[in-house]
Image (tube, rainbow, N blue to C red):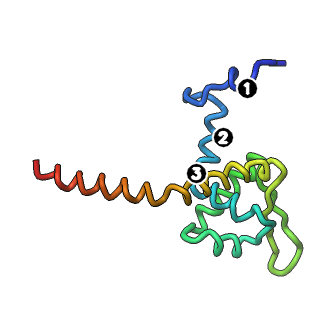
Amino acid sequence: MDTKNPTERYDVMRADCPARQILDRIADKWTVLVILALATGPLRFGRLKAKVEGVSQKMLTQTLRGLERDGMVDRAAYPTVPVTVEYALTPLGHSLVDAVVGLRRWSHAHIDKIDQARRRYDTGKSENANL
């Protein structure tokens, strides 16, 4: 059994690091939005798709499958006609909610500064394009 601290065992800067795959999953924009949507409770696919505006059916399906594979989402199918499928966060998925909510809070707190920086950057780019 490896008793090293996880920060000593893994280095996400390395391409072959297993923790990098996890970081890739949770850093994906659709994952963040799905985690936020499911944080308040289980949702059926159609309701989840409506809540996460802009996600295609294909991307939502891929995101949910990846989260299910990683143990962060449970998929429950009920024998109705047609079959009812519900998605819910697992305890592991719920453990990610605080971090995702923190990212949302950070983005809300800094959007004005980011918008200003983008305008300055874009203005400078257009001025420098003539050089």
**Disc 2 on helix, strand or loop?**
helix
Q: How many marks?
A: 3
**Disc 3 on helix, strand or loop?**
loop
Residue 6 - label = 1
**Sequence-wise first label, 3 or 2:** 2
Reply above or below: 64 against 3: below
Q: Are marks 2 and 1 in contact (CB under 8 Å)?
A: no
Q: Residue furthest right?
A: 79
Q: Residue furthest bottom?
A: 81
Q: Are marks 3 and 2 in contact (CB under 8 Å)?
A: no
Q: Residue furthest left?
A: 131
- Give the residue displayed 65% in from the left and 52% down from the top: 102
List x then y, in percent, for residue 131: 10, 47
Q: Give the amino acid at mark 3.
A: Asp
Reply above or below: 47 against 12: below
Q: Give the amino acid at mark 2.
A: Ile
List x then y, in percent, for residue 20: 61, 35
Q: Are marks 1 and 3 in contact (CB under 8 Å)?
A: no
| Front position among marks 1 and 3 | 1
**Disc 1 on helix, strand or loop?**
helix
Front residue of this view, candidates 13 and 67: 13
Reply above or below: 89 against 12: below
List x then y, in percent, for residue 71: 78, 48
Q: Is residue 38 left or right of residue 103?
A: right
For the residues marked 1 and 3, what is the alpha-carbon distance in whole angstroms?
22 Å
Residue 22 - label = 2
